[in-house]
Amino acid sequence: MGPLRLCGGRTGPVGLREERKWGLWAEDPALPHSPIVQRIREDCAEPFVAFEQCLKENQESVLKCSEHVNAFLRCAERVKLPA
């Protein structure tokens, strides 16, 4: 299970509150180059790295990483593009 699957329809990988199917995120080649995604990668690198590390350390029980993914999502939801 990849990290984005933990986010489900509740919150998408760019912090948008909307229902989407994971296939759409995975199939959109422009998404990784989106300005908001780039900004999230910069501003939220620390909580995301902590989440990835938790997943590596808890492969048998990824639910132990829920606080880490929540920290990343809170960060991502606060990211705004400059006007």
Image (tube, rainbow, N blue to C red):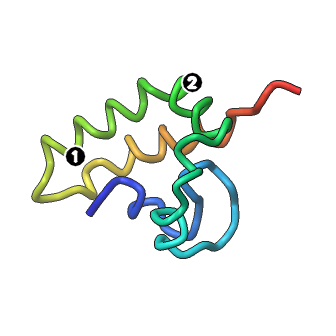
Number of marks drawn: 2
In the image, is 18 to the left or to the right of 64?
right
Q: Quadrant of the N terminus?
A: bottom left
Mark found first going from the N terminus, 2 or 1: 2
Q: Residue, x 77% and y 31% (percent of image)?
A: 81
The secondary structure type at the circle numbered 2 is: helix
Find numbered disc 1 in the image and state the secondary structure of the residue it sits on: helix
- Image coordinates for residue 56, horizontal then vertical, percent: 16, 43
At x 54%, y 75%, the residue is 21
- Tell me the residue at 32%/31% (across/down): 50
| Quadrant placement of the C terminus | top right
Q: Which residue in the structure is indicated by mark 1?
A: 55
Q: What is the crowding at mark 1: few (fewer than 14 residues within 10 Å), some, or many (at least 20)?
A: many
In the foreground, 69 or 14: 14
User: Do the residues bearing badges 2 and 1 touch, measured as CB atoms within 8 Å?
Assistant: no
Viewed as shown, does residue 52 lie left or right of 24?
Answer: left
Which residue corresponds to the image point at 38% horizontal and 41% vertical from the top-left?
68
Mark 2 or 1, which is nearer the eye? 2
Question: Of all residues shown, which one is farthest toward the front?
Answer: 29
Give the residue at the far right of this rendering. 83
- Say which amino acid is labelled 2: Asp
Q: Nearer the viewer, residue 19 or 73?
A: 19
- Is 32 placed left or right of 64 in the picture? right
Residues at marks 2 and 1, CA–CA distance in whole angstroms: 20 Å
Taking 76 as reference, is 58 left or right?
A: left
Q: Residues within 10 Å of mark 2 (few under 14, many from 20)?
A: some
**Circle number at residue 43:** 2
Image location of residue 9, percent across then percent down: 56, 70
Quarter of image, res 54: top left
Give coordinates of residue 23: x percent, y percent: 47, 73
